Amino acid sequence: MARVYCQLCGKLIADRSRYVRHPRWPADRSLRICTDCYHTRPRCKACGIPMAASLPGGLCPTCAESIPICQGCGRPVQGSFLVFDGRVFCPDCSQSRPACDGCGAPQTDERWQLSDGRILCVACHMNAVYSPDEARALYEQMKSVALHSLGLKLNVPTGLALVDRNQLAEIIRQQSNGDLSLDPEKTLGIYARRGMKRGIYVQTGLPRALLTQIAAHEFAHAWQGENCPLLREPLMHEGFAEWTAYQILDQYGYAGLQKQMLARTDVYGQGLRWALDLEQRVGMEGLIAACRTAQQAA
């Protein structure tokens, strides 16, 4: 008579054994285990079958393939959930955990706090730009994309500098002359001009894709400063800058950020939709000409 061994502990089954099956297994597949393992082994939180060891989220390998695990609490998510850049969060964690200052995802136990108080999730930290040299290289690449895809370039040297949130808030206060139309706590970048000196200032620690978006938006404001300095109408002013960033992100394949831009309901989202509609009617060159003259968009 052939010997039978427990498929969990590997010991010879000398007395009674149990057969267990997963609902998703084919009819000819089952798990034969000894009585001790049947009563003492950890069980999958989804299907209830005994396991050799507890996997992340308390799921068996079969359930782990189909049931998402919340990145916040580590529990399997059986119902609705939210997804941030491929990471799943249950409704409780989505509502109760503070948001990452980079992407807005709920914070987990693995996070990084920057010197200015911002807290980044692991995904944002791994893709964050802290080096001025890396930031300048991304900025130069972005300017090349703007030139070749949109025909936009700056004639006056305008560099990019990384600053922390507190430094950026001070630049905003100096630039606004007391009129704080920009919220220093929510603004990620700004194009600033002091006399003949011009510069783009962006928060350090932004993910590469987000830094590219912010730099492109402020680059467009710098272009406006050279080509249509009297343009102040908010919808056109911010809409053209968002359109520029949107088109440049398209060249990089950052569809997720583009979707977020289109979903905004403030002047930035409204302006972007206005610009895309005008581009559809008069073309890219017509939109740029409208920004130059300002009369066509009135």
Image (cartoon, rainbow, N blue to C red):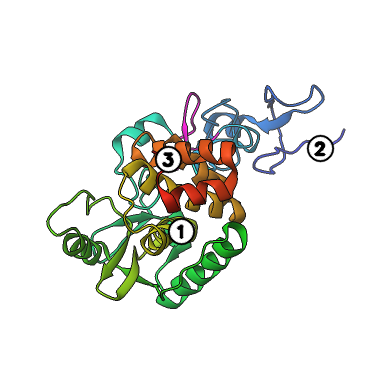
Whether residue 281 is situated above or below residue 100 in the rendered picture: above
Mark 2 nearby-residue class (10 Å; few <14, some 14–19, many ≥20) = few
**Tag in front: 1 or 2:** 1
Q: Residue at x 64, y 42 (%)?
A: 9
Magenta-span inclusion, residue 196: no
Marking on residue 186: none
Instruction: Tell me residue 123's x, y (percent).
Output: 46, 55
Q: Which residue is mark 3?
A: 297
Q: Mark 1: which secondary structure?
A: helix
Which residues lie in the magenta part? 68-82
Q: Amino acid at mark 1?
A: Ala
- What kind of residue is marked 3? Ala
Along the viewing direction, whichever of 82 and 245 lies nearer the viewer: 245
Q: Residue at x 60, y 41 (%)?
A: 52
Identify the main secondary structure in magenta.
loop
Residue situated in front as seen by the camera: 125 or 158: 158
Q: Nearer the viewer, mark 2 or mark 3?
A: 3
Label of residue 216 in the image: 1
Quarter of the image with the C terminus is top left
